[in-house]
Image (cartoon, rainbow, N blue to C red):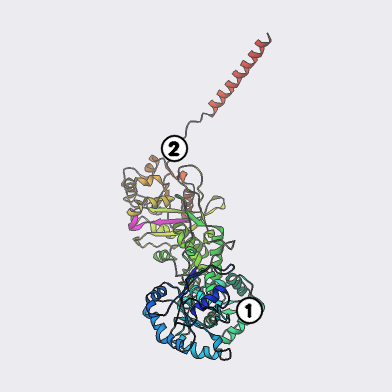
Amino acid sequence: MTTVVRICICGDEGTGKSSLIAALVKDTFVSNKIQSVLPQITIPPTPGHENVTTTVVDTSARPQDRTTLRKEIRKCNVIMLVYSDHYSYERVALFWMPYFRSLGVNVPVVLCANKSDLTGDGNAAQVLEEEMLPVMAEFREIDSCIRTSAKEGRNVIEVFWLCQKAVTHPIAPLYDHKENQLKPACADALRRVFYLCDKDQDGYLNDKEMHEFQAKSFDKPLLPEELENIKAVVSKAVPTCNISKGLDLQGFLQLNKLYAEKGRHETIWIILRKHHYTDSLSLEDGFLQPKLDVPEYASTELSPAGYRFFMDLFLTFDKDNDGGLNDQELAALFAPTPGLPPSWVETSFPSSTVRNEAGHITLQGWLAQWSMTTFLEPKTTLEYLAYLGFEGPNARDSTTAALKITKPRKRRRRPGRVDRNVVLCYVLGSSASGKSTLLNAFLNRPFDALYHPTIKPRRAVNSVELGGGKQCYLILEELGELEPAILENQAKLDACDLICYAYDSSDPDSFSHIVELRKRYPQLDELPAIYTALKADCDKTTQRSELQPDAYTAALNMSAPLHVSVTWHSISELFVALAEAATNPSMAFPKTEEPPDRTSLYMALGATTCAALAAFMIWRRSTSSM
């Protein structure tokens, strides 16, 4: 919200512009003659109110002062246009408003009918209707209007407050006077607020949800009579609304439309700003992208709070309780967001994760997909946590409470597990070696004998249960035609936890691709690796390579290739082996020769030393006693 407001007071000579300023400063009417143009004054923020500093600039309407007037109008945030009689009122439409438009300024105007003490109170409403409303209808930049009297102190503070409010809580972004409707951006923002407050997603804000909405938006409880008044107003405005169930979306939008029409648009702004909207009705950058520092060689994962949020989200929107989110349920879930994340669209979501027989993403696949997104692009996860209304255990928590940062792992050859629950494995191998089929098997897809070459990189993510009941999320990625670019990118290799070298055991030319790959990219030796012989259900053939796969891995002091087939139930053992190697990388590097065991020698030397020391002590005592 704007924290500095500059008010330019305009109007014909003798309308009481300077008297209004003097009455504001002195808190009383100044009857003595005052100078025609008062110096600029600055009003500091009022304690307990919004943190807004207000600058008030007086101006002259004389032709010789027109240059200064133009400069001040162009510098201001809001114009207070003062008139006091029929002549100066006519000049509002004939001169002042067209003049402001000719300068190209786009600021709100507050219309002030001063010297109301001269007209009396009896016809105040009639004057308001006959004078102000027609000119407001003609010039939509007029934000509000008010009758004042500097002499009687009537609405002096209020008119300056209206000017301040016209800047800090502008009506223009919220309401279209010509169409008598909330503007689309405002309606979209309020729809998202309704969505976030409708916790059970039944389409109504029940009494409990209304109380929570009131507490979040206005930091005060909603009194029973206030709630009943809201229901009565909505029932009258929207007769079709079933208010017994609560406030539906149409009623919620109608209620806010009434606030705008009655000049209470600051209420709408309070609601929107409490939900992190800016003056342009976009969500705050700091809210969508909070600061998140990820050290080198570390990674990001969902925290328990993050997993719980996405699990609750899935269960809430699985309306038919079939264990999957269909297209309609996904559309409803992503309604308050810009849609599916771009990376999901590019990878043909949900083909990258677990689906049920109907092709709908399951809870297991849903959590796996967000685990992969958080690992690869944590900023996307943070952005969607904000869109979807994540709230941490504490009210002040940002969306970063849904994430955790793992310990950096730089020395992969050091024995021991790494502190990671999400790991990335590149699957490298020749064309038609079975990489895509392996990814399909990982996602429990049926075997397809038809060959489909992979052009773009493709990922598959699923959970894997390790020894001891520990679970981790394994991301398998085949690189497609981008393989050379990715393998030459050190940052991409640093993010990778494991290489799976896959070859077709029935194709004699398949293994040589791995040999050439390791020669071309020696940096791959810095990553743990597992060798895998695919299509083990076919006839094994001799590889056209200097060394056969078993001899090749033996020369590297590494385990022999695992022989697997996607048609075997034992294929799951490969995924466990990959996950184990990724979380315990030292076991997937060449094994070093064990040093000879000298424990017995050290024990013998220790015993001999102790015996010699004891004999020496005995000899010393015997010689000293002689």
x and y percent of residue 12 in the render? 44, 82
Q: Secondary structure at mark 1?
A: helix
Closer to the camera in the image, 153 or 31: 31
* Image quarter in which the C terminus is found: top right
Residue found at x 50% / y 65%: 386
Q: Is residue 479 magenta?
A: yes
Closer to the camera in the image, 462 or 606: 606
How far separated are the C-alphas under marks 2 and 1? 75 Å
Residue 140 lies, with reference to residue 378, above or below; the image says: below
Q: Secondary structure at mark 2?
A: loop
x and y percent of residue 572 in the render? 48, 55
Give the number of marks.
2
Residue 93 lies, with reference to residue 202, above or below; the image says: below
Residue found at x 56% / y 53%: 469
Residue 178 placement: quadrant: bottom left
Q: Which residue is mark 2?
A: 592
Identity of the amino acid at label 2?
Thr
Q: Which residue is mark 1?
A: 227
